[in-house]
Image (spheres, rainbow, N blue to C red):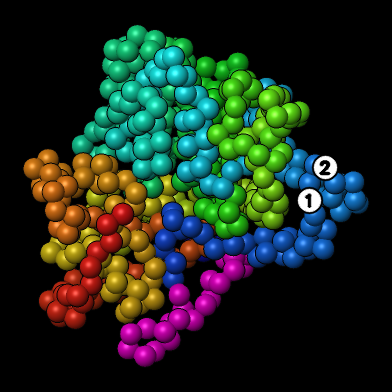
Amino acid sequence: MKAVPSYRDHVVGVETPIPLMNGTIAKAINFDNAATTPPFISVIQAIVNFSPWYSSIHRGTGCKSQFSSKLYEEAREEIAEFVRATGSSQTVIFVKNATEAINKLAYRLCDSQDHGVVLSSCMEHHSNDLPWREKYTVDYIDIDEQGRLSLRDLAAKLEQYQGRVKLVTVTGASNVTGYRNPIHQVAAMTHNYGAKILVDGAQLVPHTPFDMKPVSSPEHIDFLVFSAHKMYAPFGIGVLIGPKSAFEESCPDYKGGGTVDLVTHDFVRWAPPPQKEEAGTPNLMGVMALKESIRTLSSFGMDKIDRYETFLLYYALEKLRRIPDIELIGSHEHQNRVAIIPFNISGMPHGTTAAILSYEGGIAVRSGCFCAQPYVQRLLKIPPEEIHERIKDPHVPHPGLVRISFGLYNTREEIDTLAALLQHIVLHKKAYLDKYQAISPPIH
């Protein structure tokens, strides 16, 4: 299978020259797409084209304001269609990113009379763990030896809590290993016990077709969050999709302009959702960017994007398996994964590997724990006593991994460049360690 030039031609900055440590210039290679992606050219152009019409929305009577309001509301419909959020009972709420979306939902679902139980998992990003801890009893669905979600443990915990579980919240795909969770199977199991499901779609929605399924289906996804900055529209917008009924009662977490219908000094009648949940002047430019990125992704075909990125994943795994001292983390298979590969070089700190790739080859990767420290600790089999030592002494270096993550614009040739440099690093490990010994690995 050959690279797809049409994808690459749609992305800003893929041919950017950057300086290397030896004084030469190389073409930047970005394998850090799980953190954020560059923008589509179409997204930048859409922002420029819309700029003359930019205005306040919802209450302005001017022509530009009415036009802006129309596009803003139409964007909700396009986003809902993109993830098959069908039915008038669903609402699309704009937020800054997936992290804010999860925090908002944690606030809105909280009942001061009965906090209930939230089942997270041992493979979650901190953003799908920490927001639940203060408001609910949180328990964690276990993982297997490869780091994949245990459906057996989910079933056991649903049975154990006997209807007390309010929400099961799982990632659609891990930002560490790329594993895709069987979200519709999890949804059916969850609904069988009267609970709802939230899917953190930040790593899944940009890479594969997503279907929330009808509300009447046992496999329906009740809540979905994702971020535009991971889908080629990095302009500060995210999405929370769920039933309107979840946001109709009680007051919103942020209060102010745009959230109310009627106010006196001793009375407030809140606006209906989604307006109730979008305090202040909205990020209209971010919404326009996301809308355009969805149109561009749809024009490519999400199934085709999925197949191409899976090809990149398979190709890279085959290359890395042949390099001595490369330690691939988790399953070496490429089935049921998005295009993410975590690894280490034996005897080399993860931060050092990442620095060498950047300074010597212009290759951007990420190192550390990727805001999923409990998961990485499990994958690396860090004993509890070692973790406790790090709790007592924050200066003790943290364990971690190197992560490469592909976007639709990456190519086989870029992977060849990565593999060649990794081979050279392994062959000349001592020299590289001496040269980069002052590099400290990041914690997060």
Which residue lies under the disc numbered 2? 59
User: Marks 1 and 2: CB-CB under 8 Å?
Assistant: yes
Report crowding for label 1: few under 14, some 14 to 19, many 20 or more residues within 10 A (C-alpha): some
Q: Residue at x 44, y 67 (%)?
A: 30
Q: Quadrant of residue 141?
A: top left
Q: In the rendered view, would you say 120 is above or below 323?
A: above
Quick one: which residue is furthest to the top in this view? 162
Quick one: which residue is furthest to the left in this view? 385
Magenta span contains residue 27:
yes
Instruction: Identify the magenta region.
Output: 6-28
Relative image position of residue 429 (x, y in whole percent): 15, 74
Whole-angstrom CA distance, mark 1 to mark 2, is 8 Å
Report crowding for label 2: few under 14, some 14 to 19, many 20 or more residues within 10 A (C-alpha): few
Using the image as rendered, state which of residue 426 and residue 314 is in the foreground. Answer: 426
Q: In the rendered view, would you say 127 is above or below 340?
A: above
Which residue lies under the disc numbered 1? 56
Is residue 274 something that shows in the picture? no
Relative image position of residue 86 (x, y in whole percent): 67, 27
Relative image position of residue 345 (x, y in whole percent): 20, 63
Would you say 223 lies left or right of 42 here? left
Label 1 sits on a secondary structure element that is loop
Q: Residue at x 40, y 19 (%)?
A: 115
Q: Which mark is residue 1?
A: none
Label 2 sits on a secondary structure element that is loop
Mark 1 residue type: Ser
